[in-house]
Amino acid sequence: MRRLGSVQQKIACVFVTEVKEGQSRKRDCQQFQVVATEKVNPVALEANIDCAIATEKLDGTCCYVTNYKGQPYLWARLDRKPNKQAEKRFKKYQYSHRSCKGFTWNVEEDFKTVPEMWIPAHRVKHHNGHPVPDEHGHIPGWVPVEMDNKQYCWHSSVVDYEVGAAIVLRPSAGNEDVLEIAAVPLVDLQEQTLELIGTNVNGNPYGLGSKKQPVHCLVSHGSVRIRNPPPVDFQQLSSWFQESPEGRVEGIVWHCNDGTLIKVHRHHLGLRWPDGKTSLGDRAVIIHVNGTVDEYDNSKDLFTPFSRLNGHCFSQLQDIQFDL
């Protein structure tokens, strides 16, 4: 199975989009909506999207595994954003021009400081040695997840740097209809991007865990395939999202043969998300977290409770619960 592309940048929509007046369905403070037209994006056609692999777009927060302190580490997504004055100037320009094209940034002065360990994401453009903001005025990047950083406590709950492993949700090798939660060596995830999903991430659309017993896990981007995806057609995609059990997903990400990533989000088609049960949350899951409780002797992470459930099967993902 070929390795699919990692997510280091904003991904283009499969349809040509346009901006419409009105409250955004996705962002509370945004007074406009980005909606899809019925015209397929030329970028998708050039990348031969009809031959691409369709995968589920997951609703969580993006992570990355790369080296830090001489070993594979989990990194959290942290975009470098403009300060208040620069943001105000950018919004004013955007409003008057109905576009951000032509806006000039002073990267040294316009942006908030980031932690010393911060690195820009791959393929971020540079000018005079400085990373250049994207069309949204952000510089995508990453910071390493340290175990004592409360801001990233849910990230740190799914990694154990002493053991060198992460809690990963993926389709079972023996039966792709069934999911498995496994302790995967971080070295096997090197240079991959993943989605952290769970109780305290993005409103928990998959119904994982509870406030009393939070459950989180990482999902490698591109690992959850969509079988029999609909053709790249506005009406057929819209019907699939609303009528197919497999369509109860946030969106689709197509991985094209040339490495191009293309997506569609339910919001692009004017559809709600979340909207009741999810395809992922309804799937059966088996726990494969081997190792002794002594090996995973860290009360802050999820390895100990998952190791106690090793071999246990749940009829649906949202049924996972730990014995207190």
Image (cartoon, rainbow, N blue to C red):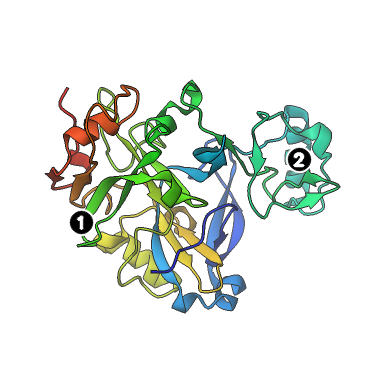
Q: Amino acid at mark 1?
A: Val
Could you say which disc has been placed on residue 74 in the image?
none
Q: Are marks 2 and 1 in contact (CB under 8 Å)?
A: no
Which residue position is annotated with label 1?
178
Q: Nearer the viewer, residue 183 or 256?
A: 183
Alpha-carbon neighbours of circle 2 within 10 Å: few (<14), some, or many (≥20)? Answer: some
Alpha-carbon neighbours of circle 1 within 10 Å: few (<14), some, or many (≥20)? Answer: some
Q: Is residue 277 visible?
A: no
Residue 130, given in percent of the width and then of the height, sits at 79, 44
In this rendering, position of residue 85 left or right of residue 175: right
The residue positioned 45% from the left and 78% from the top of the image is 51
Q: Nearer the viewer, mark 2 or mark 1?
A: 1
The residue positioned 39% from the left and 62% from the top of the image is 55
Q: Rounded to the nearest whole Å, what is the CA distance between mark 2 and mark 1?
A: 47 Å
Instruction: Answer above or below: position of 238 versus 193.
Output: below
Q: Amino acid at mark 2?
A: Phe
The residue positioned 61% from the left and 74% from the top of the image is 42
Q: Nearer the viewer, residue 297 or 248?
A: 297
Q: The N terminus lies in which quarter of the figure?
A: bottom left
Q: Is residue 106 visible?
A: yes
Instruction: Answer above or below: position of 234 versus 162.
Output: below
| Mark 2 or mark 1: whose residue is earlier in sequence | 2
Of all residues, the one furthest to the right in this rendering is 128
In this rendering, position of residue 193 left or right of residue 82: left
State the SS at label 2: helix
State the SS at label 1: loop
Could you say which disc has been placed on residue 90 in the image?
2
Q: The C terminus lies in which quarter of the figure?
A: top left
Residue 123 found in image quarter = bottom right
Residue 54, given in percent of the width and then of the height, sits at 40, 67
